[in-house]
Structure formats: C-alpha cells, structure tokens
C-alpha cells in the first residue's frame, strides 16, 4: 500500500496530511484528535483498499502550519477549516471518520452542513466539551489568563526521539511502537535537540464553552447515519456521553470494542471491519 504526503493551501494556512487509494475511489476523510496528527490513522489505512482515504493534520498539529500570531484555536474555527477544505476539493456527500476532538468537530460540521456528509464514524468520541451557562464569566477569565501565562512558555526539549516517545508514552494509553508513529510526525530537530511541532497555544484554556443545551442542539441536527465505536477502556466522558446523548442522533449504530481511547490504533482490523459493515448498510 502506497501512502502519499499531501497538502492543501487554505488562505494563509497549509494543511498537510496523508492519503492512500485511487483518486477515482470514494473519498473518506479522517480527522485526528487533540495533540495527535494524521499518523494516528496509519494502522487503519491498509484495511480500506477500495477507498481514497485522506487523513489531515489539523492546523497547529503535525506538518500543518500554525494559526497566525494574532489568532487562537477556537472550536468553531476547526469547523471552518473543514468548510474551506470541502470547498477547495468540491467534496459532496463523503464519509468522515473522526477520533476524539476530530469526532467533535465532524459532528458540528455534519449538523451545520448535512448536504456534505454521507456518514459519520466516531471513534471514542461523542458530544462536546460543554459547561454550565453560570460558569461563563469564570471560563472567560481562565481562558484569557491562560493566554497571558502561555506567551513566554518554552516547549519541552528532548535529546533524542526516544526520549520524546517515552514522555508521550508516560501520559498516554499506547504502546511505545504505536506512540512512535504519532511522535515522529509531531516532532522536529532544532539544533542538537528535538522539540514538538505542535503549537503551544493548543494547550490554552478555551475562553468559552458550549452549554449543554447548545451541544444537544448540534447532535439533534445531525441527519446522516452515525457509527459510534468506543473502547471498553476509553475516555470516561465518552462512556457517560453514550448514556446521555445516544438518543439524540436520528440514526445511530453503537459498538463497544476492546481497547482504550486510541482503539483504532490498537486494533485496526476489527475497527475497519466494523466501519466497512456500517458503510455497506447505508441506503443511498
């Protein structure tokens, strides 16, 4: 299987990514989670031989450019990134696979632009990060304070790639082998040390959150079939979200499979089989 590097110029941003499959095949867009990159889909790509799979690096991640110095990483801006990407490629009614944050962004996009999405597969992702309306002022203060605090913060440096991989393994749920896929695309050598490619501003606290009512409104407005696959040892917020939000989707397939938050990397074959079966059941 040949995996190609690709890039898209969207206004002042350059989105990089990975692709495989024939240009004539149906397009499937793969969207990674927060502080991951397109390489998180590498274990899954070989199992879709009749598809054109495109896995992008979100802005500020992997090889993609960072947002401008006067910008920040608002949730709604991720959705606009997708709007621009779809406009550039003239995509209509394609399938999307979204992991974690990628699934949240894809859910909002599918709600606002139902004509663009044939189906949505969510990998250990459901709903949105939301907060009580009563916390709005506190959230604003925390978010803006985190911007000030982060202005002069230096990125961690590592003497070797192995050191960076070990640091990521220590705070994640993946083996060294799988972690290395993400780290090698997410790190750069500068002088005699290695540092993370990701934009430090990604770690800033958001100055606003959707309310629960707003989050539910978005999920209710998703019209396409949704396939939720979540890990037995996945995120607690996903397990809670399955109980609270499942009934909001008009057409939902639900599967719990062995694995953690990155179950699509740990067990790519059964995940791929599940997704293909879901696609085969779609009514055009």
Image (tube, rainbow, N blue to C red):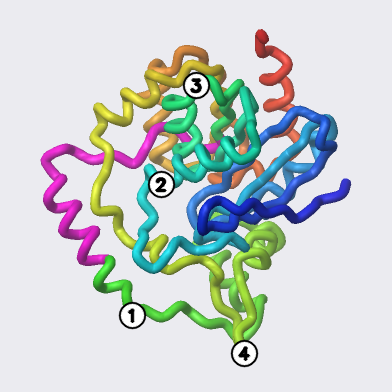
**Residue at image mark 1:** 152
Circle 1 packing at 10 Å, graded few (<14), some (14-19), many (20+), is few
Viewport quadrant of the C terminus = top right
**Residue at image mark 2:** 77
Residue 277: in sight, yes or no?
A: yes
Going from the N terminus, do you reach mark 4 or mark 2 first? 2
Alpha carbon separation for disc pair 2 and 1:
24 Å
Query: Which of the two marks, 2 or 1, is nearer to us in this view?
Result: 2
**Horizontal and vertical percent position of residue 272:** 72, 33
Residue 256: in sight, yes or no?
A: no
**Residue at image coords 26%, 43%:** 209
Secondary structure beneath dot 4 equals loop
Secondary structure beneath dot 1 equals loop
Q: Which residues are magenta?
A: 123-146
Going from the N terminus, do you reach mark 1 or mark 4 first? 1
| Residue 114 - label | 3
Secondary structure beneath dot 2 equals helix
Residue sitting nearer the eye, 173 or 10: 10
């Amino acid at each position: 299987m040949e995996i190609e590097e690709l890039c898209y110029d969207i206004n002042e941003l350059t989105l990089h990514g990975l692709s495989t499959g024939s240009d004539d095949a149906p397009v499937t867009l793969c969207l990674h989670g927060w502080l991951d990159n397109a390489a998180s889909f590498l274990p899954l790509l070989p199992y879709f031989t009749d598809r054109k799979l495109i896995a992008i690096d979100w802005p500020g991640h992997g090889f993609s450019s960072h947002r401008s110095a006067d910008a920040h990483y608002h949730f709604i801006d991720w959705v606009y990134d997708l709007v621009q990407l779809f406009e550039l490629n003239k995509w209509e009614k394609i399938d999307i696979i979204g992991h974690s944050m990628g699934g949240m962004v894809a859910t909002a996009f599918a709600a606002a632009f139902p004509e663009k999405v044939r189906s949505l597969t969510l990998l250990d992702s459901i709903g949105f990060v939301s907060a009580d309306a009563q916390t709005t002022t506190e959230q604003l203060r925390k978010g803006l304070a985190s911007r000030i605090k982060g202005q002069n913060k230096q990125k961690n440096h590592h003497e070797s790639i192995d050191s960076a991989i070990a640091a990521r393994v220590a705070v994640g749920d993946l083996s060294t082998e799988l972690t290395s896929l993400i780290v090698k695309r997410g790190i750069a050598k500068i002088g005699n040390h290695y540092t993370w490619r990701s934009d430090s501003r990604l770690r800033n606290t958001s100055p606003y959150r959707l309310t629960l009512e707003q989050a539910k409104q978005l999920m209710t407005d998703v019209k396409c079939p949704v396939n939720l696959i979540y890990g037995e040892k996945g995120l607690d917020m996903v397990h809670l979200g399955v109980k609270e939000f499942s009934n909001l989707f008009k057409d939902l397939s639900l599967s719990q499979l062995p694995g953690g938050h990155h179950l699509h990397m740990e067990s790519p074959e059964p995940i791929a089989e599940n997704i293909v079966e879901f696609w085969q059941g779609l009514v055009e």
